[in-house]
Image (tube, grey):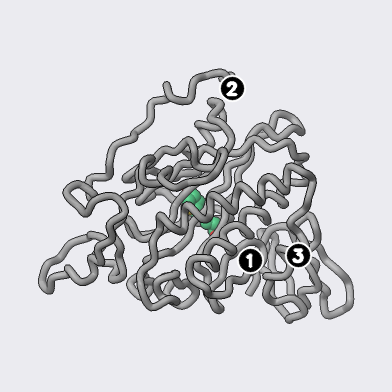
Amino acid sequence: MGREKRFSKLPLDLSVPTWMKGNPSDGEIANLARARRPGVSSNTLADTGRAIMEKLSPDTIRRGLTTRSMGQEVICYDSVSSTNEVAKELARQGAPDGTLIIADEQTAGKGRQGRSWFAPRGTSLLMSLILHPSLTTSEIPRLTMASSLAVANAIEEVTGLPVQFKWPNDILLGEKKTGGILTEVGLSGDVLDYAVIGIGVNVNLDVSLIPEIADVATSIAEELGRPASRLELLRILLRLMESEYDLLLRGESPHERWMTRLRLLGDKVQVTTPWGKESGRADTVDADGALVLRRPDGTIVRITVGDVE
Ligand code: BTN
């Protein structure tokens, strides 16, 4: 389908999430945790313990947004399978650069390496940005690095807390993961047709209520000791994302700045790759995003896909 297809004609669900109806006015925040009543069994935001009620809608997101393109086209879902899946479809249909797809809940959220990404409704930033950059396929990792930098800087601006990266692109607060990025691309031969930057950030998630991730994950609210505003974080992130993207399009690689936030450099690590485990010292991450590992026998291996422990 050609780029000329009008974006506004797409069959999109722009409805206001049902859980927002009758709730505080735009931007107003109510700590639902306080409203939690003993003995009432439900599966609401309050169950996450640190919930904030904010309306994520095209209007509330665009209000005060100073970007040229990032988030100027925005589609909000109450619940959707995966914002990345929607974004890929819209990108193929010609949605413009900077189109934002955002949801309060994903029923099939995707993480890296075929894993799933779970977040209770309303607790997290679950979003995808559609981009059509003129980059070569080998430059795609730059896009993910630029996006991680934007997320890290946005979290720091909102919280004042230091943010670090774990290779390849986990976003850490302290030792624990608070966000991740899933970049998916569409190619026409060797040419990049579109990129979808999927971003998940645990904002007001009470990770202790999710035993599967409680040991390794955290959230902004956990680390701050109080809930944070998803809207504020989102607007700052969109602004910083636009600056990073502009730099990238001018040919500037984010690699050096990205490296300054990277943990585990020089440490002995074990890496689980789709082909098996590798151990050694994490020497560096090269400009193409590969982890350069020095094995105990001194040989060097470049790892492009995997998880570090
Ligand atoms: C990771 O595994 O670290 C990457 C996680 C990326 C999750 C986000 S949530 C919004 C977007 N939609 C998805 O299905 N995944 C990404």
Q: Nearer the viewer, residue 292 or 136?
A: 136
Q: Residue 110: in sight, yes or no?
A: no
For disc 3, does the CB lie below 8 Å from ligand 1?
no
Q: Quadrant of residue 276?
A: bottom right
Residue ID at (53%, 30%): 95
Q: Which of marks 3 and 2 precedes in the sequence?
A: 2
Amino acid type, residue under disc 1 in the picture:
Asp
Identify the residue position indicated by label 2 in the image. Answer: 3
Please determine whether, in this image, residue 231 is positioned above or below residue 299: above
Q: Which of marks 1 and 3 precedes in the sequence?
A: 3
Amino acid type, residue under disc 2 in the picture:
Arg
Secondary structure of the residue carrying tag 3 is strand
Q: Residues within 10 Å of mark 3 (few under 14, many from 20)?
A: many
Secondary structure of the residue carrying tag 2 is loop
- Number of numbered labels in the structure image: 3
**Distance from Cα at disc 3 to Cα at disc 1:** 10 Å
**Distance from Cα at disc 2 to Cα at disc 3:** 36 Å
In the image, is 261 to the left or to the right of 176? right
State the mark number for residue 307.
1
Secondary structure of the residue carrying tag 1 is strand
Q: Are marks 1 and 2 in contact (CB under 8 Å)?
A: no
Query: Percent position (x, y) of residue 264?
Result: 70, 77
Identify the residue position indicated by label 3 in the image. Answer: 291
**Distance from Cα at disc 1 to Cα at disc 2:** 37 Å
Query: Percent position (x, y) of residue 62?
Result: 43, 43
In the image, is 65 to the left or to the right of 130? left
Q: Nearer the viewer, mark 3 or mark 1?
A: 3
| Rendered-image quadrant of the C terminus | bottom right
